[in-house]
Amino acid sequence: MNISIFEQWWLAIEPAVQANTLNFWQFIYKEIYLNVIKDDRWLQYLKGLGVTLEVSFYAILVGLVLGTVLAILRLPQIQHMNARGKGFLPAVGAVVVRALSKFAGLYINIMRGTPLLLQVLIINFGIFGSVRIDKVIVGVIACGLNSAAYVAEIVRGGIMSVEKGQTEAGRSLGLGGIRTMIYIILPQAAKSALPAMCNEFISLIKETSILSYIALTELTKAGDYIRSRTFSAFTPYIVSGLLYLLVVLTLTWLIGKLERRLRNSDH
Amino acid sequence: MTTDIIISVKGLEKHFDEGKLKALRGVDTDIRRGEVVVVIGPSGSGKSTFLRCLNLLEEPTAGTVTVEGVNITDPKVNINKHREKMGMVFQHFNLFPHMTILKNMTLAPCKLLKKSKQEAEEKAMALLKRVGLADRANAYPSQLSGGQKQRIAIVRALCMEPQVMLFDEPTSALDPEMVGEVLDVMKQLAEEGMTMVVVTHEMGFAREVADRVIFMDEGHIIEEGTPEEIFNHPQQPRTQDFLKKVL
Ligand SMILES: Nc1ncnc2c1ncn2[C@@H]1O[C@H](COP(=O)(O)OP(=O)(O)OP(=O)(O)O)[C@@H](O)[C@H]1O
Ligand SMILES: [Mg+2]
């Protein structure tokens, strides 16, 4: 019969397992064998990791786009926008923009001021309570909407760190407000916001673990599930944790590289 | 120089802090095509504010600015179109640090004049040659000296083929040895017939290049005339005082 080296090692310590006389290394091997190797359980971690990465990726995108819009709405010149000229339309336009700005402020406060877990539960059971919908989508929406509030503050800080002269230079060339924002201000804001943004991405990736509460089988839930099968005290959580660590360290490394490249290109 | 008026300013006022600070208190003047106007005056007299009202970087509190017959303070006017015709050069250069020199110069022409990248780059390279910086086309602003940056800022504005150039103390942030190279570019521009409004403390430049000198104080034009009139025979006591201090 063809059995793997892992199986052979397992057979070797099995009597000691039965007799409860494992030494330290044998104990470690038993935990690894039961929680990772047996029945190809490592595949379940990888599947969970895949879900975590998928949710994180799309939630980061949602957070970046929505957060940038919120950040722009919170800029002083938008917050205190005056009607340019007399007449009905400019007046209504200014009122709408100011109202949107107020709403953005309210949104940021609510999302930052309440626990993510509650937001996830409310979105899952409240908004999507009566529809069948992929939990991945629920997770992306919940984590993305939450992250947007933090991203908004980071981007706003980045925008405010760009000198006023940059806007003036763009506008004096004839570029409109939106083009000036896109081509001149945001690229510079992004650069100065990169370290804080990296932090936010890391938090988001780890906080997706909360989605295990709505039965999304991401990395934490995968560990949970294996634990319920193997009755290990906490080994599956360690395995999940190591995988989170791996992802975060990889991301940190990548962003560090990007930062160095940006620093070398201009000042 | 013709008598064709390109910018006409009437009753221009600008207040800050809800009227507590009156930076401009009623300024009237006309800028003629091809004219070089130098604005001088003590710090805080409203020179920058006046210049920035000409392209509406500051929105006037009262009065009108008419550019080529169009009152640009009218909210219905597309101000971006008018700014294309009015280049501006700032004290602190305000080059875009995340773009190469060439990109700095071609961004606006590509987006606004609908020029092809190649067309815009050819124009930019020609201008860079003129100011002796063709070899720095692919450098980033941080790799240039102050004088080089300001020369780039000037040609960046020229890439939009403006009718008027506005300068706000273009040499004030420069080390003394770099002032000359920037003033030379400005002189050359004046000789080619560019309409220019220049706020500066360089009295030598004003004397040599200006067609008209405006002396401002406390938000008013106190006195204006040829460099000869202003520098050699100032009529107003405040002008005399100011010149005594700076000359
Ligand atoms: N954005 C602003 N907010 C409030 N006050 C301002 C603003 N810009 C200018 N001022 C004030 O308006 C007055 C005129 O300023 P301005 O910059 O036009 O003077 P200036 O003649 O250019 O002086 P300088 O030679 O120092 O550049 C000053 O008292 C200044 O403090
Ligand atoms: Mg000034």
Image: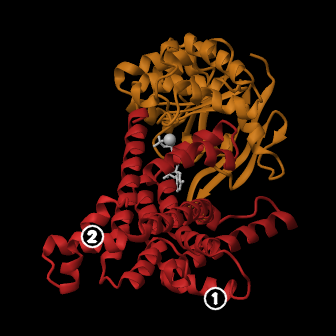
Chain colours: A red, B orange
Q: Of A144 and A240, which appears nearest the observer? A: A240
Residue A63 horizontal/vertical position (percent): 57, 64
Q: Is residue A193 above or below residue A232?
A: above
Count how many numbered circles sit on residues in the image. Answer: 2
Which one is in front in this view, the residue at disc 1 or the one at disc 2?
Answer: 2
Q: Separation of disc 1 and disc 2 at Cα?
A: 44 Å
Question: Mark 2: which amino acid?
Answer: Trp
Q: Earlier in the sequence, mark 1 or mark 2?
A: 2
In the rendered image of this protein, does residue A89 appear above or below residue A138? above
Disc 1 residue: CB within 8 Å of ligand 1: no
List x then y, in percent, for residue B156: 60, 26
**Which residue sits at x=43%, y=33%?**
A265
* Observer able to see residue A82: yes
Q: Read off the residue under disc 2.
A: A10
Q: Secondary structure at mark 2?
A: helix
Q: Chain of mark 1?
A: A
Residue A128, x across and y down, in percent: 69, 83
Camera-side residue of A90 and B34: A90
Q: Which residue is mark 1?
A: A125
- Quadrant occupied by the C terminus of chain B: top left
Are the numbered discs 1 and 2 placed on the same chain, yes or no? yes
For the N terminus of chain B, the image quarter is: top right
Residue A183's quadrant in the figure?
top right
Up the image or down, B226 lies above or below B218; here it is above
